[in-house]
Amino acid sequence: MARVGVLLLNLGGPERIEDVGPFLYNLFSDPEIIRLPTPVLQKPLAWLISTLRSGKSKEAYRSIGGGSPLRRITEQQARELQSRLRQEGVDATSYVAMRYWHPFTESAVGDIKADGVEEVVVLPLYPHFSISTSGSSFRELQRLRQADPAFRRLPIRCIRSWYDHPGYINAMAGLIAREVRASDTPDAAHIFFSAHGVPKSYVEEAGDPYQQEIQACAALVMKRLEELLGHANPSTLAYQSRVGPVEWLKPYTEDALRELGEQGVKELVVVPISFVSEHIETLEEIDIEYREIATEAGITHFRRVPALDTDPTFIQGLADLVHEAMAGPEVNLDMAAQLPKKVKLYPQDKWAWGWNNSSEVWNGRLAMVGFSAFLLELLTGQGPLHALGLL
Ligand SMILES: C=CC1=C(C)c2cc3[nH]c(cc4nc(cc5[nH]c(cc1n2)c(C)c5CCC(=O)O)C(CCC(=O)O)=C4C)c(C)c3C=C
Ligand SMILES: [Fe+2]
């Protein structure tokens, strides 16, 4: 029997307040998170944004106990999945590969090689594919594989996304049904799906299938929920956690909550749909910020469905996904990271004269170069502005 390594991909989170700044720097250094047409500016911009954001982020992490529970929960999921697979006769060991904090992807790959694993199943702990999440981790793995002949030799089967997998849909519907039954008005409780957002351009320009997978998933969960409850509840899908000035997927969670309040909705069952573990965006953003907005909007009952964490139906669903992947063909990282549409990531790169997309991009680039030079001068204390006595 082959020794199988199940590599679980996740984002990672700061474990202590001191980790918040470096964690944010790692996150914003990723070109899949901030898609800049000029890569040379990625690191200065990451430094700037992480510095500006870290106060707000630290406050949020403080309010949930001083750090993210994501590593602890992901490691628990990994242990339970491993024991489930071993009970089912697979010689499996699971490994956790975080994208922006410990344990990093590189260290998980090192452990896989040291343990003599013979084949790898890559399972992102994101049910829905996005360029910014699974896509980014697949690319990181691709870089590590290209640089390492020993890793390259291992057969690999990547699971791209699993938003429609029966184990996951059943587990989600089961948890929601519990909250609906416990509500004051089970027939009328409004099911509110809150998914992590992404910038609109990811979907419309770069061809990210994320929105389509989220919509399809919410529809499947609602169908299963109706079967479990014996009645259809009203539902809404909205997107949370917007960062920065650009437009993200709409409706935004805060706006949708206010609108439901205006419509007279009183009882809400909030479902964190794109997350499979509790973390800052469930424990702080939903439980504290959005609860407050809903209450102000006149929603009197706000119940939040817990994240799946180590729910047994969910862990069994993950084990089934691994079995299905092992029974299928190899799926390499290129195939897993592929986008459905053949699109240009930066359509504005195409040159054209006049006041248009391309000239706006070049203005933006020149402004960024000027801004970086200014930043450099501030840091080094040397440059033309100092020479002119302006700094
Ligand atoms: C489906 C899940 C996620 C998507 C899609 C996603 C996209 C995305 N996120 C940011 C910016 C931030 N994300 C942060 C933390 C964070 N995000 C996810 C999940 C998705 N992100 C997780 C699991 C976590 C870790 C949470 C934890 O408990 O530590 C943060 C840091 C927290 C904060 O300051 O708000 C940022 C910033 C962008 C820009 C983006 C898409 C482009
Ligand atoms: Fe995020």
Image: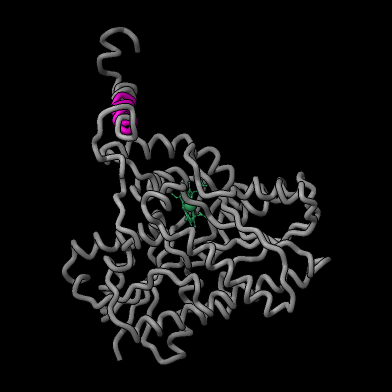
44 shown above or below 100? above
User: Does 369 appear in magenta?
Assistant: yes
Q: Position of residue 336 (x, y in %)?
A: 32, 67
111 shown above or below 262? below
User: Does 22 appear in magenta?
Assistant: no
Query: Which quarter shows the C terminus?
Result: top left
Q: Position of residue 9 (x, y in %)?
A: 40, 65
Q: Quadrant of residue 152?
A: bottom left
Q: Is the image coloured rainbow, by chain, by secondary structure, or in one colour?
A: one colour
305 shown above or below 40? below
- The magenta span reads 360-372
Q: Main secondary structure of the magenta part?
A: helix
Q: Residue at x 26, y 62 (%)?
A: 142
Tally of numbered discs? 0
Q: Position of residue 81 (x, y in %)?
A: 47, 79
Q: Quadrant of residue 82?
A: bottom left
Q: Residue furthest right?
A: 184
Left or right: where 391 falls relative to 166: left
Along the line of sight, which residue is nearer the eye, 325 or 207?
Answer: 207
Q: Residue at x 80, y 52 (%)?
A: 264
Along the line of sight, which residue is nearer the eye, 255 or 146?
Answer: 255
Q: Residue at x 38, y 88 (%)?
A: 90
Q: Quadrant of residue 103?
A: bottom left
Along the line of sight, which residue is nearer the eye, 26 or 232?
Answer: 232
Say whether residue 83 is visible: yes
Query: Which quarter shows the N terminus?
Result: bottom left
Say whether residue 105 is visible: no
Q: Residue furthest top?
A: 389
Q: Position of residue 164 (x, y in %)?
A: 50, 73
